[in-house]
Image (cartoon, rainbow, N blue to C red):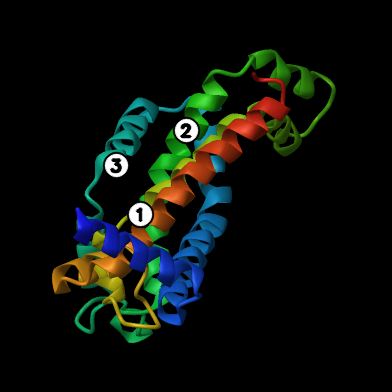
Amino acid sequence: MTELWDISREAFRLLFTGDPDLWRIIWISLKVSIAALVLITPAAVACGFVLAMVPFRGRRAVVIVIQGLLSFPTVVVGLILYMLLSRQGPFGSMALLFTQEAMIIGQMIIALPVLVTFTLAAVQGADPRAHETAITLGAKRVRAALTTLGEVRFGVMAAVFNGFGRVISEVGCALMVGGNIAGLTRNIPTAIALETSKGEFAQGVALGFVLIALALGINFTLAFLQGEGGLK
């Protein structure tokens, strides 16, 4: 019990004394995950909207595949990307392996099914009269789509927040394509895995506290926004 207390105390000391190595890891995690979400969200939301609103042959199969990707192991995503980006791979000449750019690509792929599935569910649950009314009043397709998405904005926000929670905590893909390079690609989950394997628990615990704080912050923020929107 004393050892656990000492580890926790050292973890808080690292956090609140501004340990540069610790905060560099946190910054890399936030930078990569936010960049991945910013880049993939518009396309994923548009895809979810189209799947919900536009009937076409094979749509059900596409939806089933995307929903299945929700549980796709992130380490397999990393393995596929590793083979594509390695020197022997088709994109090896781009020299992206073991870079933050490769991590961003991996996290975009991981976040995609989360964003599409949540948006799809939100749009399917919306009142269809909003879209129909916009079309009747002469709105173009894009404007009508934005009107519908505005009606389900909390569902879209839930998609984004859940996508962020998914990518900020994944370790398999980040380790495979990032390489866990100190100061460059070492993020929160890979640092926790490394420090724990070395028996250095204080930094791992400190980073674990950050992940918990992020998870709670995401949920409280979404609940606050929904409350402000009258969904109490």
Q: Residue furthest right?
A: 137
- Position of residue 159 in the picture relative to residue 175 (left or right): right
Dot 3 or dot 1, earlier in sequence: 3
Q: To which residue does mark 3 refer?
A: 69
Q: Residue at x 26, y 54 (%)?
A: 74
Q: Residue at x 39, y 81 (%)?
A: 184
Q: Are marks 3 and 1 in contact (CB under 8 Å)?
A: no
Residue 126 appears in the picture as rendered = yes
Place of residue 202 in the rendered image (x, y in percent of width and height, measured from the top left): 29, 67
Q: Residue at x 49, y 74 (%)?
A: 17
Q: To which residue does mark 1 refer?
A: 169
Q: CA distance from mark 3 to mark 2?
A: 13 Å
Place of residue 136 in the rendered image (x, y in percent of width and height, measured from the top left): 80, 19
Residue 157 appears in the picture as rendered = no
Q: Are marks 3 and 2 in contact (CB under 8 Å)?
A: no
Say what amino acid the circle numbered 2 marks.
Phe
Query: In front here: 206 or 108?
Result: 206
Q: Which mark is residue 118?
A: 2
Q: In the figure, residue 181 lies in which quadrant?
A: bottom left
Name the quadrant of the C terminus. Answer: top right
Mark whose residue sits in front, 2 or 1:
1
Q: Residues within 10 Å of mark 2 (few under 14, many from 20)?
A: many
Say what amino acid the circle numbered 3 marks.
Leu
Q: Residues within 10 Å of mark 3 (few under 14, many from 20)?
A: some
Q: What SS does tag 1 mark? A: loop
Dot 3 or dot 2, earlier in sequence: 3
